[in-house]
Amino acid sequence: MPYRVEMGVYLSTPKTEKASEDGENDKLRYGLSSMQGWRSTMEDAHAAHLDLDTSTSFFGVYDGHGGKVVSKFCAKYLHQQVLKHEAYLAGDLGTSLQKSFLRMDEMMCGQRGWRELAILGDKMNKVGSMIEGLIWSPRGGEANGHVNDWPSEEGPHSDFHGPTSGSTACVAIIRNNQLFVANAGDSRCVISRKGQAYNLSRDHKPDLEAEKDRIVKAGGFVQYGRVNGSLNLARAIGDMELKQNKSLPAEKQIVTANPDVNTVELCDDDEFLVIACDGIWDCMSSQQVVDYVQRQLNAETKLSVVCERVLDRCLAPSAGGEGCDNMTMILVQFKKPLNSGVSYNEQPVLLSPRV
């Protein structure tokens, strides 16, 4: 939860019920689990699509802050945008990922964005938003020579600048022997290669030199390790009040949804992938998670159960401090052989092992 924690955000006892699922195809298997924990609300969301198309799988973890609607919006729409983008159709998955992250902010603005967020929000908003959906009709179905899959709408919220809440996004796409990881925020993707943990994403904290430089140039400041003294993330989807510098592109705003994109050639030494929100990484290092998962896999075949055990291991015994955040984890295990007998010697673009 990136905003400052105030009194009243914790429950008297944690909610330890978990939402879990498993799935597999001929190339990989996955399990996931999420838990509200000590937080008064659940703001995490996730997406797992084994068959985004016939050769591609998609997994995403979205850690919301200031509300749940942006993480839920991303879980509902981000993979759809990746799939529809012309770069994806041309085989350029990295570009389609980057454009889709930025597209989330665009889609959440205006009357249409307001209505979609209202539907994903509390029940009080749903009635009003559905009525407005009946009253205010879409504006035009074509844009830039392409059929517009997100037509704008006229209505009382046409000048809506987008949500003040936000969400991290950490996404992994697996196609054949290629892995694409896109990340904005401090959720993290880690791969286990021969038992060694390698980070495939970088936590976007405001104190990082490149992040701080962008923040200051855009008119913001970093105080107590937080953007403008409030948000302890330098990149996120949403948080639109920190993206209002009209003279700068989306990539250079105080906070940006622009992701780092990393491409890895998978090999038979690659065992599994973990994507999780900072509720996990605050409690365990990348290598500790890999070691723990490996031990669990020796005796447990159901991957969601392994995820559930990680969540329970991270849960704090009492409210306050580490282990009190919402927690979400996706575990993806690669089936062998990955490369149909072909051996790859290339090292992936791995960011900081043993972290």
Image (cartoon, rainbow, N blue to C red):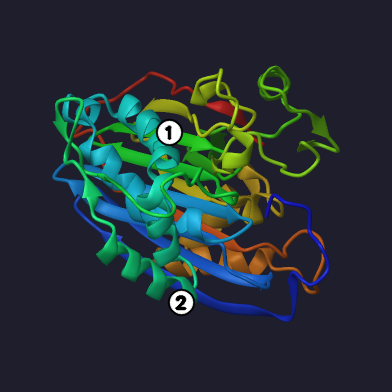
Q: Residues within 10 Å of mark 2 (few under 14, many from 20)?
A: few
Q: Viewer-nearest of labels 1 and 2?
A: 2
Q: In which quarter of the view is residue 270 placed?
A: top left
Amino acid type assigned to the residue bearing label 1 in the image? Leu
Residue 57 in the image: x percent, y percent?
27, 46
Residue 168 in the image: x percent, y percent?
55, 45
Taking the view exactly as shown, the residue that stands out farthest to the right is 224
Q: Relative to 87, is 44 on the left or the right?
A: right
- Residue 336 visible (yes or no): no
Q: Relative to 37, is 148 on the left or the right?
A: left
Residue 311 in the image: x percent, y percent?
60, 65
Amino acid type assigned to the residue bearing label 2 in the image? Lys
Give the residue at x 67% y 73%: 40
Q: Nearer the viewer, residue 267 or 46?
A: 46
Q: Earlier in the sequence, mark 1 or mark 2?
A: 1
Taking the view exactly as shown, the residue that stands out farthest to the bottom is 13
Q: Nearer the viewer, residue 308 or 2?
A: 2
Q: Nearer the viewer, residue 165 or 322?
A: 165
Q: Nearer the viewer, residue 112 or 353?
A: 112
Give the residue at x 59% y 43%: 239
Real-space CA distance between mark 1 and mark 2, rounded to the nearest whole angstrom: 28 Å
Q: Residues within 10 Å of mark 1 (few under 14, many from 20)?
A: many
Quadrant that contains the C terminus: top right
Q: Relative to 197, is 158 on the left or the right?
A: left
Residue that carries the numbered disc 2 in the rendered image:
123
Q: In which quarter of the view is residue 103 placed?
A: top left
Q: Secondary structure at mark 1?
A: helix
Quadrant that contains the N terminus: bottom right
Residue that carries the numbered disc 1 in the rendered image:
102
Q: In which quarter of the view is residue 174 placed?
A: top left
Q: Look at the picture and state if 210 lies above or below 125.
A: above
Q: Look at the picture and state if 133 lies above or below 247.
A: below
